[in-house]
Amino acid sequence: MFDNLKKKDPAVYELTQKELQRQRNTLALIASENYAPMEVLEASASVLTNKYSEGYPGKRYYAGNEVIDQVETLAIERAKKLFGMGYANVQPHSGSSANFAAYRALMKEGDTFMGLRLDQGGHLTHGSPVNFSGQIYKVESYAVDKETEMLDYDAIMKQALQVKPKVIVCGYTAYPRTVYFDKFRAIADACGAFLFCDIAHIAGLIAGGAHMQVGPYADVVTTTTHKTLRGPRGAIILSNKEEHAKAIDKGVFPGSQGGPLDHITAAKAVCFHNAMQPEFRTYAAQIVKNAKVLAEEVQSLGFRLVSGGTDNHLILIDVKSKGTGLNGKIAQDALEKAGIICNKNTIPYDTEKPFVGSGIRIGTPAVTTRGLKESEMKEIARLFGKTLEHPSDEAMLAKIKGEVKSLMDRFPLYPEL
Ligand SMILES: *Cc1c(COP(=O)(O)O)cnc(C)c1O
């Protein structure tokens, strides 16, 4: 696939090969990552990248879009079918740009919205002061319950009735539990807000029937396509409400983007097709099964899990709870040296600074794609535990890295590359 790149630009070619080796040899436990299948990579690398197609199917600003119109229409129809929703915009370049366009469609500058606190699992775009969302709008954050570390829907209802926000955002980056969209719908109805569901992390679980559906409850849905959905890097916006369709389209183009990435639109269409197959349901169910086993195993090593477990693809581990001087940063660095790639994370009501954090977030979407099952989750937990027992023993970390590689060698990645 890369013959010309190899010849014309060996420097970039070498880097792609190095990254391929890194992906093959290490354990990808970052909850927001996945391995896109070859057909998605091929569509992403197609000649569709050459076209300018500002506008929407049938209403373009440039000539020559008869094929691109078909590509985008196919992606739109598949996205609608996959999530059972009446409208889709498949042009957003990323989750953050999708959220920008969706907020623009639902709010005016200075309007108030409610989202989960960033340090408890909300995303940057859910009201962080360093992000547009916290700068353009007024933010009233909600929090998880201090005891259960789960969403307290009664408390959120109470807060929403006081705040009367224009929009309520649900869907998170580091929340290991089911999101009850029906309860959020009731809250939004009670206070007269729009319900905005950002399902970036759990879209694949929803599409694969391993998490409750979002379509019947949301006013607007955004999702990335590269996380559990296992497609190209990008995002989409969905809605069931005709009233939002025009405003969202305008919010994307010309509101915040120029020409769409047509090669990525094609790859999104492939991703949606894949996600409608019966095998994808098996995949989504296995992600959750793997996460449950991994959670139990990590817990039995003596680590406390935020909220006590997981319902979805991710686990938030309070590594400080072990009492051996660990924090998120120390753990992440030691694990990386052992070939176990994950990220430090704050935990609810964390006493550590965000850059350090008390937690480690791990997820099973990528390893499940690779074919690992319950018995390998036990092996992963063992390697994880051994690493964190010896976080500064370089020789031990190097030895574990070898064990990680042997494990991953049993599950070939991109053999055709
Ligand atoms: C990942 C994520 C996003 C943003 O995605 P980018 O493509 O990185 O901009 C938005 N919302 C949530 C909840 C996410 O987890």
Image (cartoon, rainbow, N blue to C red):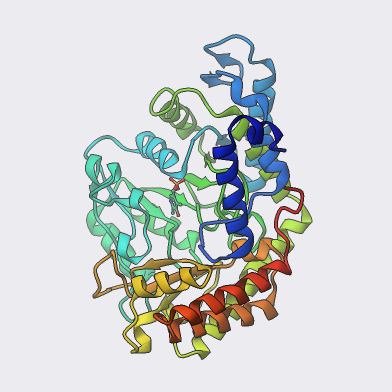
At x 67%, y 77%, the residue is 376
Quadrant where the N terminus is found in the figure: top right
Q: Is residue 108 above or below residue 66?
A: below
Can residue 176 be seen here? The reply is no
* Horizontal relation, residue 412 to residue 290: left or right: right
Q: Residue at x 33, y 89 (%)?
A: 323
> In the image, is residue 414 above or below residue 60?
below
Judge by depth and name the residue closer to the eye, 118 or 233: 233
Closer to the camera in the image, 135 or 372: 372
In the image, taking residue 329 as reference, residue 213 lies left or right, namely right
- Identify the residue at the far top of this view: 63
Residue 335 in the image, given as x and y percentages of width and height: 47, 73
Q: Residue 176 at what x, y percent from top left? A: 48, 70
| Residue 47, above or below 173 | above
Q: Residue 287, position in %: x, y?
A: 63, 67
Quadrant in the rendering for residue 119: bottom left
| Residue 141 percent across, percent down from the top left | 27, 58
Total count of labels:
0
Whether residue 392 appears in this view of the structure is yes
What residue sits 65% from the left and 32% below the top? 7
**Is 358 placed left or right of 51 in the picture?**
left
